[in-house]
Amino acid sequence: MIELSGVTKSFGRPVLRGIDLRIPEGCLYGLIGPGAAGKSVLLKIITGLVRPDTGRVSIDGRNILTMTDLELQEFRKRIGMLFQNNALFDFLNVADNIAFPLRRLFDLPEHEIQQRVAERLACVSLPGFEDRLPAGLSGGQKKRIGVARATVAQAPIVLYDEPAAGLDPVTSQKIFDLLRAEQRAANATVVMVSSDLDRLLTVTDRVGMMLKGRLIFDGTTAEAYASEDPYVYQFVHGIPEGPL
């Protein structure tokens, strides 16, 4: 379980304003809201990449804010992450990009690393792409490689920041279906930030909506659609005129 209590963060101005959030184990959680609501910062706080100004962040009952650097390094082995811009290394081929977290965090024999890379490529429907460079990949292929890298360590928690940004609707739906299939296969706890609500909400179990640094809604996907809160209703149903 991921649990945040009273989490605040400022970068010259308040970005997060007292976030209380519980994400159950094995849940695919969608984090939605307008731009600059604090969604990406919240993801980085969960990973320990950013420290909040106040509050508590617990993963499976452990407060990550009290961990030593060594404990935090060990903890990050339990988390996979797909960054908004994919964060692929242009100078590494596909295989080395996917293998990067394995080599950085684990002491594994090379044959096992190569085997895991091949398995991940097969899972994202890109078998045989090991030797290709990112510059020669389409946007959808880069996203799939990012998914392969985020899941190669078989982490029980995976975070996705705009996994379908810049993709056409058909490719976007394929990416979301892939992420859902990966989550179910691993029974992972997934937190996903996306502006593509039409497709995101086809795969989520629960949804949280952020607005101006606050979590204004937390509930099931069905409850999000049925919400009478004017901000949630406008955002979920894509109504151009309203309080936002």
Image (cartoon, grey):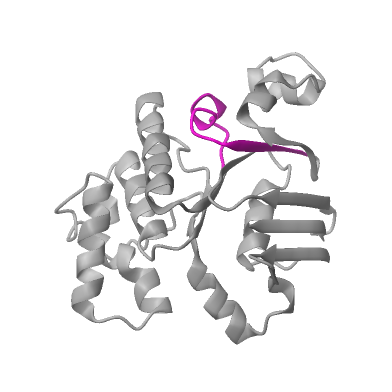
In the rendered view, does 20 fall on the left or right side of 86?
right
Toward the viewer: 127 or 190?
A: 190
The answer to whether residue 154 is magenta is no
Task: Give me the residue at 54% from left, 35% from top.
Answer: 204
- Counting from the top left corner in percent of width and height, residue 206 is at 62, 37
Task: Give me the residue at 35% from left, 62% from top.
Answer: 152
Residue 34 seen by the camera? no
- Counting from the top left corner in percent of width and height, residue 244 is at 78, 25
- Specify the quadrant that holds the N terminus: bottom right
The answer to whether residue 200 is magenta is yes
How many tags in the picture?
Answer: 0
65 lies above or below 239: below
Toward the viewer: 106 or 221?
A: 221
Q: Residue furthest left?
A: 128
- Counting from the top left corner in percent of width and height, residue 140 is at 33, 40
Task: Give me the residue at 72% from left, 47% from top.
Answer: 38
Q: Which residues are magenta?
A: 193-211
227 lies above or below 59: above
In the rendered view, does 42 fall on the left or right side of 228?
left
Write down the quadrant of residue 129 in the picture.
bottom left
Write down the quadrant of residue 49 in the picture.
bottom right
Residue 184 seen by the camera? yes
